[in-house]
Amino acid sequence: MSDIMNPGATTRDDAFPSAPADWTREDAARAAEADGIELGEDHWITIKALQGYFQQHQRPNVRELHDALDEAFHAKGGIKYLYAMFPGGPVAQGCKFAGLQPPAGAANPSFGSVQ
């Protein structure tokens, strides 16, 4: 009924309040599957963190974002763990799955991507 009353309206996923309006978990799962990755709990935590960061920062700083993710997963191995989850880089590939435009420099191997 909501679709009839509000054509084109999007339904927000309460678990991802900072997600882009046109993003869905299914979109993330399809993008991950295309890259040969099955999304697990830590992937979703990373995606949610990326979306939250982008909502709070108009000009995302790749180094700051990279370091924050490293710190958040420090107990599990930090950046090495993140690269195991996101072989294309935790920032570049993570943004792809999160429905975000990777910030400038994210594709640079020294800033969070191996692509």
Image (cartoon, helix red, strand yellow):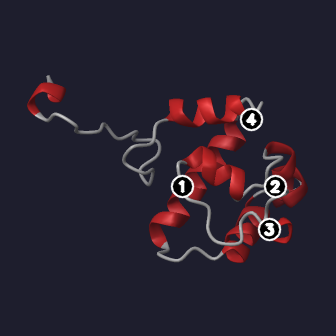
* Residue 47 circle label: none
Q: Disc 1 to disc 4, how far (Cα)?
A: 16 Å
Per the image, the residue denoted by label 4 is 35
Per the image, the residue denoted by label 2 is 115
Q: Amino acid at mark 3?
A: Asn
Q: Disc 2 to disc 1, how far (Cα)?
A: 17 Å
- Which secondary structure, mark 4? loop
Instruction: Say few, some or many: other residues with alpha carbon within 10 Å of mark 2 (under 14 / 14 to 19 / 20 or more).
Output: few
Q: Residue at x 46, y 41 (%)?
A: 15
Q: Residue at x 67, y 69 (%)?
A: 65
Location of the C terminus (image quadrant):
bottom right
- Which secondary structure, mark 2? loop
Q: Amino acid at mark 2?
A: Gln
Of labels 1 and 4, earlier in sequence is 4
Q: Are marks 4 and 3 in contact (CB under 8 Å)?
A: no
Q: Amino acid at mark 1?
A: Leu
Per the image, the residue denoted by label 3 is 108
